[in-house]
Amino acid sequence: MRKTLLLAGIALCCADVSSTVDAKTPSLPPYKDAGLPVETRVEDLLSRMTLQEKIAQLNQYSLGSNDNVNNNGEIVNVLPPEIGSLLYTADDAVSRNAMQRRAMEETRLGIPIIFGYDTIHGYRTIFPIPLAQGASWNPDLAGEAARVAAIESYYAGIDWTFSPMVDVARDPRWGRVAEGYGEDPYLASVFGAATVEAYQGGDMSEPGNIASCLKHYVGYGASEAGRDYVYTEISRQSLWNTYLLPFEAGVKAGAATLMSSFNDISGIPGSANHYTMTEVLKEKWAHDGFVVSDWNSVLQLIDQGMAPDEKTAVEYAINAGLDMDMVDNLYMPHLEALVKEGRVSEDRIDDAVRRILRVKFRLGLFEHPYVEEKPESERILLPESLETAKELAVETMVLLKNENGILPLEPDTKVALIGPLAKSRMDLLGSWRGRGRGEDVVNIYDGLSRAMEKPVEYAAGCDFEGSDTTGFAEAVKTASASDVVVLCLGEKYSWSGENASRSTIALPQLQEQLLAAVKRAGKPVVVLLSNGRPIDLTRISPAADAVLEIWQPGVMGGPAVADILIGKANPSGRLNITFPYTTGQIPIYYNHRSPARKGTQGRYQDIPSTPMYEFGYGLSYTSYDYGPLTLSSDTCSADGKITASITVTNSGDIDGKETVQWYICDPYSKTTRPVKELKHFEKKLLRAGESCTFEFEIDPLRDLSFRDTEGNPVLESGDYYIIVKDRKARLTIE
Ligand code: BGC
């Protein structure tokens, strides 16, 4: 592994954060005058820059390796202080401030560096993985978590996070399904937008606000066979109706930046794609921030069979609209020559620099280049942050099965806690865990022990994989001496995330064998599943009395699980990604098209063709009764508005949060449409016995249209259906 010697070149002096730049000094050049509009300042600064200074702004270096084992930074002995950005991997703001001081004081123009980092689902307070967050159907709560993540990141010296990932992902073999919000473009749009707003706050220059980065632009989730870094075959139709939608929503929410993707999009890699980066993003959507490449994705244009050499790779990338080069270090050595040879215009360089400077000005970096250096006790793992982590973890968990109401457990139940995940800490954090540490995690054993009145008996039973069954006997003995077995199965943190594809979504046989073994004790078995992707539960679910999907729940996973198991919290998560019966069903997702033949025709001969647990599914400890679905009118003009309503009653005797999911269906269209499409959802607390009316205000152009191959909405007249659960109402557009 290559290690960086970056700090050798930095004078690590203690930063004086009070020495911000005085914006009002009259002799200052206009770009240093905070009172002037950003655009005036950008143009003034740009007019003073040499070509070399401009090119330097387009480079992001890395401070060694980040927490992704795939990413090892270049050896950087003495980092030039003129660089645009640094991928920052220190734990605090000290070296950031030292490096920033060099940029501010040792360079001709004093342009601050923007420090980026992968704060994905938390910086040090690690929240549930994004896939889990989507299953909460609570974007406000996910936003609260993102606020905590932003503040912790900011005080660690970070201005910019490479998040949210809004790739629609429908192949659970792909390890990166863990990093996004699931299979639905609308759900990903809502969570992506909420996260962007939470990171950036109203005004990015306020302390504690950081810039966001929508990634991976675009279509990375369509990776063939779930392998990473591979080709994706995406028609314009799918590009516009599936993959681009969450990016469009994120851009509307104000995302400062985007990251171009690794994948080859139908022959034009994401990092050299003029259509997506320039024609769509910058021209059609008028995004005025910048696009950063993914790690080495400029260099990868060579491996992908597009550019024959590094210089051509740079030419293709910059001309396609890729503004900043992450870690390749290729823009720096090649751009000047490319400009001189006329292969890249200086206008394009200016445009890229302008975009980067704009974000730096908006972040207030020129006025506040340094970050206050606070002690850890004041900036990470604060009690209220941990409370948010627990609340969110509770809401992400999905109860998949609960035979005979085995859950919730009485607090005096004697629990046998078994399985390789029962005492694990790191595995509850999942991939891309920022600066998260195992020691910060309250594991399932500790969480449950604190909640139960009787001691929780523990036996690991076996490891995550392998063939060693010697622990089974002890597990069965422990199970026999208990009232209920809580069996913790699932994946290690490294089994999902980047470069973590799997050929099967079944758990290793050893874990299934452990379940079969403990069943022999004759006690009810509650299976807890912790994983970063849907799992094949064909053999697990029928053998269990209850199954609770806890995903990778973060630092407060243990207490959150305990609250649900003893009924202190009522499960309210719903699947945001389909759980197939077997790997052979992949791809399988709810918003598919109608097949050409109905009935049994076209189905698999050997396995079911429907999923084991479908999108939107999840049980509760209470029951909800849905009243009739009504429309304010059953006809509407294209520019009219209709309100759909449904009254839901909590008919059980336990309070609960119910999510009403509103789908639409366009049964006949000149371009065929999915059998149903999520267009709105709302989660509300319903006290036992309480009724509440949920509404969906339908804007036909927004909610009923599809996109043509250039992204323009097309609304056809005719009949549509509004769908909630098994209720359906017809709406005619005149
Ligand atoms: C990943 C990105 C990440 C970047 C920087 C890449 O390998 O694909 O998601 O933001 O590294 O760490």
Image (cartoon, grey):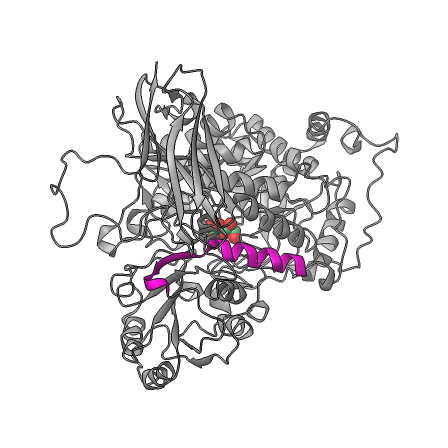
Q: Position of residue 69 (x, y in %)?
A: 48, 62
Q: Is residue 627 above or below residue 299?
A: above
Q: Inspect this view and state whether residue 524 appears.
A: yes
Q: Is residue 52 above or below residue 712?
A: below
| Placement of the C terminus among the 4 image quadrants | top left
Q: Position of residue 264 (x, y in %)?
A: 36, 41
The one nearer the camera, 616 or 642, is 642
Q: Is residue 39 found left or right of 135 in the rendered image?
A: right
Q: Give the quadrant of residue 390.
A: bottom right
Asked if residue 403 is among those painted magenta in the image, a careful observer would answer yes
Q: Residue at x 81, y 51 (%)?
A: 17
Q: Which residues are magenta?
A: 383-405
Name the dominant secondary structure of the magenta segment: helix
The one nearer the camera, 706 or 613, is 613
Q: Position of residue 268 (x, y in %)?
A: 36, 36
Q: Is residue 359 above or below residue 494?
A: above
The one nearer the camera, 726 or 393, is 726
Q: Give the quadrant of residue 546.
A: bottom left
Q: Give the quadrant of residue 306.
A: top left
Q: Residue furthest right?
A: 26
Q: Residue at x 56, y 56 (%)?
A: 391
The one nearer the camera, 596 or 83, is 596
Q: Inspect this view and state whether residue 321 appears.
A: no
Q: Is residue 62 above or below residue 734?
A: below
